[in-house]
Image: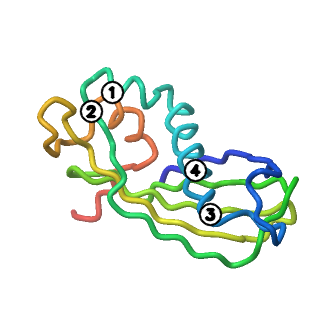
Amino acid sequence: MFTSEHHIRVRYAETDQMDVVYHGNYAQFFEVARAEAIRGLGLTYKNLEELGVIMPVVELQMRFLRPAHYDDLLTIRTILRDLPEDHRIEFHHEVHNEEGRMITTGRIVLYFMDSASQSKCLMPDILRQKLQPFFPITNSGS
């Protein structure tokens, strides 16, 4: 399992009239955390695009457990539970406040797609090589 953490401090502009982080901002928080997780592996989305692979979001689910407020320091945990075997990659996100309480969860599915043909493709080998160490092969036979 691959896990990464990124911290975001809530800006005033990200809150609504109730002093709560506007729900739509969590999609951006998740995107930043995913991009930084990939950067932590030594790659960027730009690198993947240069290889001719794009990664559009095809599913997004969020669950709001507690509010976040202006100036809160949030920890966004990005989790990849399974190494992709086909054209899909599924990220799970957990948002925790400074007290360590989970406040929001998310699940996001992206597709690997060839940018020229706009058709589904497999995960680029370079990304697979970077992720493989987090998913050891277990030999349950023998």
Q: Amino acid at mark 3?
A: Glu
* Residue situated in front as seen by the camera: 30 or 122: 30
| Dot placed on the residue nearer the N-terminal end, 1 or 4 | 4
| Dot placed on the residue nearer the N-terminal end, 1 or 3 | 1
Q: CA distance from mark 1 to mark 3?
A: 27 Å
Q: CA distance from mark 4 to mark 3?
A: 13 Å
Foreground tag (2 vs 3): 2
Residue drawn at (88%, 53%), measured in percent from left and top? 71
> Judging from the image, what secondary structure is the residue with disc 4 in?
helix
Q: Amino acid at mark 1?
A: Glu
Q: CA distance from mark 4 to mark 2?
A: 21 Å
Foreground tag (1 vs 3): 1
Q: Amino acid at mark 4?
A: Gln
Q: CA distance from mark 1 to mark 4?
A: 19 Å
Residue drawn at (52%, 45%), measured in percent from left and top? 34
| Dot placed on the residue nearer the N-terminal end, 4 or 2 | 4
Residue 94: mark: 3
Foreground tag (4 vs 3): 4
Density class for disc 4 (Cα within 10 Å; few <14, some 14-19, many ≥20) is few
> Residue 115 appears at what percent x and percent y?
21, 32
> Residue 75 appears at what percent x and percent y?
73, 54
Q: Amino acid at mark 2?
A: Val
Q: Residue 122 vs residue 30: left or right?
A: left
- Please give the residue where the numbered disc 2 appears in the rendered image: 53
- Please give the residue where the numbered disc 4 appears in the rendered image: 28
